[in-house]
Image (spheres, rainbow, N blue to C red):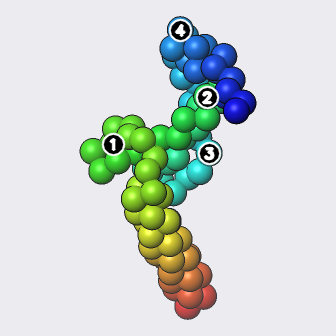
């Protein structure tokens, strides 16, 4: 069996994670991934970071769908009101 490379995890243990935003779900909810060890986090309902589990992935997908439809509806409303 091949052992996974432990160097990225050791780096994060010594120097801390280097998180980058990988997905913007809404204006306030984002998904993050560590550049070194690929750990994934997301923003929870309290605004703090939590591990990105399948349950949170599903929640984020639903939030993103609702957010996109709401912003699209507002854009359409603003366009139609500016015509008159």
Residue lying furthest front:
1
Residue plotted at (51% across, 77% down): 69
Mark with earlier residue (4, 2): 4
Mark with earlier residue (1, 4): 4
Mark with earlier residue (4, 3): 4
Q: Is residue 79 above or below residue 37?
A: below
Q: In the rendering, which numbered label is found on residue 22? A: 3
What separation in Å lies between label 1 and label 3 (alpha carbons)?
Answer: 17 Å
Q: Quadrant of the C terminus?
A: bottom right
Q: Which residue is mark 4?
A: 14
Residue plotted at (49% across, 65% down): 61
As helix, strand or loop, the secondary structure at mark 3 comes to: strand
What separation in Å lies between label 4 and label 2 (alpha carbons)?
Answer: 12 Å
Closer to us: 16 or 3: 3
Hey, which quadrant is residue 6 in on the image? top right
What separation in Å lies between label 1 and label 2 (alpha carbons)?
Answer: 23 Å
What separation in Å lies between label 2 and label 3 (alpha carbons)?
Answer: 14 Å
As helix, strand or loop, the secondary structure at mark 4 comes to: helix
Q: Which residue is mark 2?
A: 37
Disc 4 crowd rating (10 Å Cα; few below 14, some 14-19, many 20+) is: few
Residue plotted at (42% across, 41% down): 51
Q: Quadrant of the N terminus?
A: top right
As helix, strand or loop, the secondary structure at mark 1 comes to: loop
Mark with earlier residue (1, 2): 2
Q: Is residue 74 above or below residue 42?
A: below
Nearer mark to the viewer, of 4 and 3: 4
Q: Which residue is mark 1?
A: 47
């Amino acid at each position: 069996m091949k052992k996974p490379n432990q160097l990225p995890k050791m780096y994060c243990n010594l120097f801390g994670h280097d998180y980058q935003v990988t997905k913007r779900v809404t204006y306030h909810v984002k998904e993050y991934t560590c550049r070194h060890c690929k750990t994934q986090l997301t923003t929870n309902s309290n605004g703090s970071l939590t591990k990105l589990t399948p349950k949170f992935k599903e929640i984020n997908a639903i939030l993103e769908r609702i957010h996109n439809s709401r912003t699209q509806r507002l854009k359409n409303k603003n366009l139609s009101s500016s015509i008159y």
